[in-house]
Amino acid sequence: MTGADLTFDVVVVGGGHAGCEAAAAAARCGARTLLLTHKIETIGEMSCNPAIGGVGKGHLVREIDALDGIMARAADAAAIHVKMLNLSKGPAVRGPRAQADRRLYREAVQALLRDQPGLTIMAGGAEGLELDQAGGLAAIITADGQRIRCGAAIITTGTFLRGEIHIGEKRFPAGRVGDAPAIGLALAFERLGLPLARLKTGTPPRLDGRTIDWAALEAQPGDDPPEPLSWMTERITNRQVSCGITATTPETHAIIRANLESSAVYGGRIQGVGPRYCPSIEDKVVRFADRERHQIFLEPEGLDDPTVYPNGISTSLSEAVQEQVVASIPGLTKARILRPGYAIEYDHIDPRALTLALEMREVPRLFLAGQINGTTGYEEAGAQGLMAGINAARRASGGDPDASLTRSEAYIGVLVDDLTLQGVSEPYRMLTARAEHRLSLRADNAGLRLTERGIAWGCVGSERAARHRAFATAVSAALARAATDGASPAALSGFGITVNQDGRRRSVLEVLALPSLALEKIEAAFPWLRDLGPPIRTQLEAEALYAPYLRRQEAERRLLEREEKANIATTLDFDAVDGLSAEMRQRLKAARPATLGAAGRVQGVTPAALAALAVHLRRDAQRFT
Amino acid sequence: MSAADTIYALASGAAAGAVAVLRLSGPGTGEALRGLAGSLPPARRASLRRLRAPDGEILDHALILWFPGPASYTGEDAAELQLHGGRSVIAGVMEALTAAGLREAEPGEFTRRAFLHGKMDLTAAEGIADLVAAETAAQRRQALHQADGGLAKLYGGWAERLARLLAHQEAAIEFAEDGLPTDLDAKARAGAGELRAEIEAHLADARRGELLREGLVFAIIGAPNAGKSSLLNALVGRDAAIVSARAGTTRDIVEARLDLAGVPVTLSDTAGLREAGDEIEAEGIKRAERRAQEAQLVLTVFAADQPPDAETLRWVGPEALVLVNKCDLAPAPAAIAEVPVIAVSAREGIGLATLRDRLAEAALRLTGAGQGNQLTRPRHRAALTEAATLLAEAEGAALPELTAEALRAALFALGRLTGRVGVEEILDIVFRDFCIGK
Ligand SMILES: Cc1cc2nc3c(=O)[nH]c(=O)nc-3n(C[C@H](O)[C@H](O)[C@H](O)COP(=O)(O)OP(=O)(O)OC[C@H]3O[C@@H](n4cnc5c(N)ncnc54)[C@H](O)[C@@H]3O)c2cc1C
């Protein structure tokens, strides 16, 4: 079937987490958008762990939400167990996490997309890319030969590029269990000469919850009340469930050791590099041989779904061995496996071929987002999809795709900078340790940091914009008052607050920063604090707590700003820079840093090389002025 | 300066000797060797070859060494030619190299290239610069130790420990749910404290390494006509200062360099301390006092035939040497202001050997004689002081993310000493040391 050509501003290929955010964002920015994906019913599918958020990942979700994305809202609609991680630590490293009912999540995503004006959804597979004479993207060709012309396209096909599943010695091509891989697209990328590399990831077997001996296991309840992920959610209404906790035993480890040959990875049938933070149970047993137990969280996949996700035993052992492994675990001795665990190998594109807008440097109007860029995780995928969607919409309307965030503004900025500058050597996952401005990039202030940027880019709806502005005004007023209002040491001691009796007046912010002081005492001294809503008070507390550090970071940031402003022309010939060693030239050519600051972050670039580059840039600047 | 260039330089100094060593480095080294010697010799083995000019004329029979990169001093392809030291031989070979497109190296260019290729860290590169500039044996010892990577090893070891502390702290923050040990926070703080103590001990060095690198300053101070200038001349062994019977002859500071047990010392003769006769003398006295303040050792000089003057007495103390000059004219007291004196006569040469020993002793004590790990530059001190302050902050931080923050900043301070430290290195440690992943 070859119908007449279709025409859209933006075409998004793939209905996973990257594709959904991309399509929704492009449409919010006013682009006539098509979402093209294999199956409409799997849009919003969580291919692995039924949870959204966590430490680092939760930060990303809040940032997606601050730019009016859909992930947090869908997660709230589907949440059945919510936890704020790291509650005993400071606000900067607390990460919200929600376990979702898999079906509810899919339905919520699909509903949000259906309701999005300007967005068309179509079932079908993309097989080819058509370029115009200048080498820019012109159209997407589907498996049925349909030509879809567009102003920009975003490819978000996840693990589907030449995906291959391994279960023990069995292997077969697939995008994930039950889905065919995308081979035509991989060939199209190869023909374009794009750099491809192979990675792998895995997933645990799924268990039938009705065959688990819950009574024998420790139960872990979620937070009460559960805190929503989205700023737009009033409260979470689903019934909340508990997770079970169990662990592997020495017997489990003995079984695994005796059967390593059956593991696809240890049998040598997989070459792709897997993520170190998500190792298979085989890996854990081999690499940490002295450990006697590895913890497993049993996470229900849904309220009306008996499927349970045993978090901690991702594996590519054969099905028979998986049965033995599961049976050796307390509480699971009679558990039935609904679907075996597996490992999947897939191609990804070296993201150093992308600009900060996630557009291919060599193929204008072609954007890539999600796992295809070598990341892992829904949140990482969604964040890229969102940014690619905004930029593709700008590109399609004839504008510059210049919507980007810096490392000091957002985890999204850290993510995109890391990917496009460093590339990946293993599936990339967000960690708070990657963000040098961690203390100011908090999950609790994502809206304050980003929503105004989103309004300027046109991706934030009016309802959120109004809410945000009201909140931002209230926070600034409270901060201003807390900086000016205060009391003398003598007055404070009247409320049981002891500070040095040096006669120096302390501001409310200073008092809030005092270690281990009960909030009631502070509220007694400054009763107006009681009238602030909890979200505003959280802002005050965090600002007070981190103030000295934030000042130092701000000073460092300003110091670096000059380097960040020293642009490196995209045409700069690194071979012509005096004093660079061959290795430095090669690293810089692969990364193509856009600024001197970015060059300094390229892995392995030495201070000496940086100095040589700085001298060259200055000399160049003088030549032109 | 371009790394694409191939460079050469005479490594054996400009003076003519029996053997001259010419060094080559850069991508064109192999080609140049082939041109000179006909073919490439086996790598890293001395080979005797005839060297020819482009027109075929034989220039020399030379010992040549070929070091293919990266296993060379600079990390590039490199070679050494040991020529017969005649001026015309050297000139002929250099001409042939220039004709082959090579150029003469700029000062320090070989070391710069080695640093650029990651062959050495910053402190080792500094050590090489110091080695070239070393004037005395102790300076040479110290520079050699640093060039050999002595400081690089010490600071690199600290940076490694610090990276590990940070990684463990980060693991506790990032993977709290993964059943990690519960004492990671406390251990990170304790580790920060131990490292801080070590760095502080290293810093409490009375600036020995820096003083040796810069050279010591000893100031001679005393009343006019106590014989300070004669003493200086006697110690230096030549007439550096004008000596006359007229009090107040020395008005500005006269300096002479001494090598005391391998330590370079600048000995300063200063204007005599007294009520100034004129403006010039007053300025001279001011300078004398300033110099004495800056000096690492003050030699107070009294005359045996005069009672100790109040101006000079102010400088007498346990840290100063007390000399009584002109002991040939009158007996010297055993002690002045309870400090035992060294009796000398500059004119007769009495007591000078003892004085020299005492000065050498002081020079060795003040500089450590270039032994062991001593920091040698204010840059080192600044970075280490900052690291120690930040470690103290990490030790006392109330929250794990604040400990991490301070540890990270401390690591960067150390990184500035030796090179850079990246996030990836921290994450490598996290995943190597802990079983992460539910
Ligand atoms: C087995 C497995 C285990 C995983 N384990 C973990 C884990 O433990 N922890 C973790 O954080 N993350 C894990 N992940 C990763 C996480 O699921 C992904 O990173 C995330 O879903 C990526 O989102 P995406 O939008 O890039 O791609 P996906 O969610 O994979 O979506 C790709 C979409 O593109 C569609 N598509 C593909 N090709 C075409 C085509 N040619 N034409 C049209 N449509 C196409 C597909 O139908 C699909 O809808 C795992 C993934 C898998 C598959």
Image: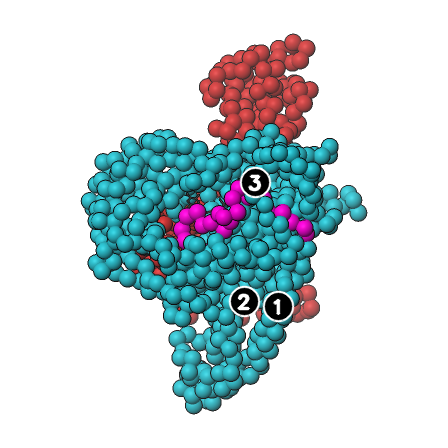
Chain colours: A cyan, B red
Q: What type is the residue that disc 1 sits on?
A: Glu
Q: Is residue B89 above or below residue B363?
A: above
CA gap, disc 2 and disc 3: 33 Å
Task: Point out residue A140 in the picture as x, y percentages from the top left corner.
Answer: 64, 38
Examine the image and state in which quarter residue B330 appears. Answer: bottom left
Name the secondary structure under disc 3: loop
Which of A275/A325 is in front?
A325
Task: Point out residue B157 in the picture as x, y percentages from the top left corner.
Answer: 40, 47
Is disc 2 in contact with disc 1, using a CB cutoff of under 8 Å? yes
What residue is shown at x 39% (from left), y 47% (from top)?
A: A277
Q: Is residue A462 visible?
A: yes
Q: What type is the residue that disc 2 sits on?
A: Met
For marks 2 and 3, the one nearer the N-term is: 3
Q: Which residue is mark 1?
A: A463
Q: Is residue A96 above or below residue A289?
A: below
Within 8 Å: ligand 1 and the Cβ of disc 3? yes
What residue is shown at x 47% (from left), y 69% (from top)?
A: A235
Q: Which residue is mark 3?
A: A124
Q: Chain of mark 2?
A: A
Q: Is residue A431 left or right of residue B272?
A: left
Nearer to us: label 2 or label 3? 3
What residue is shown at x 63% (from left), y 61% (from top)?
A: A460
Q: Which residue is mark 2?
A: A232
Q: Quadrant of the N terminus of chain A?
A: top right
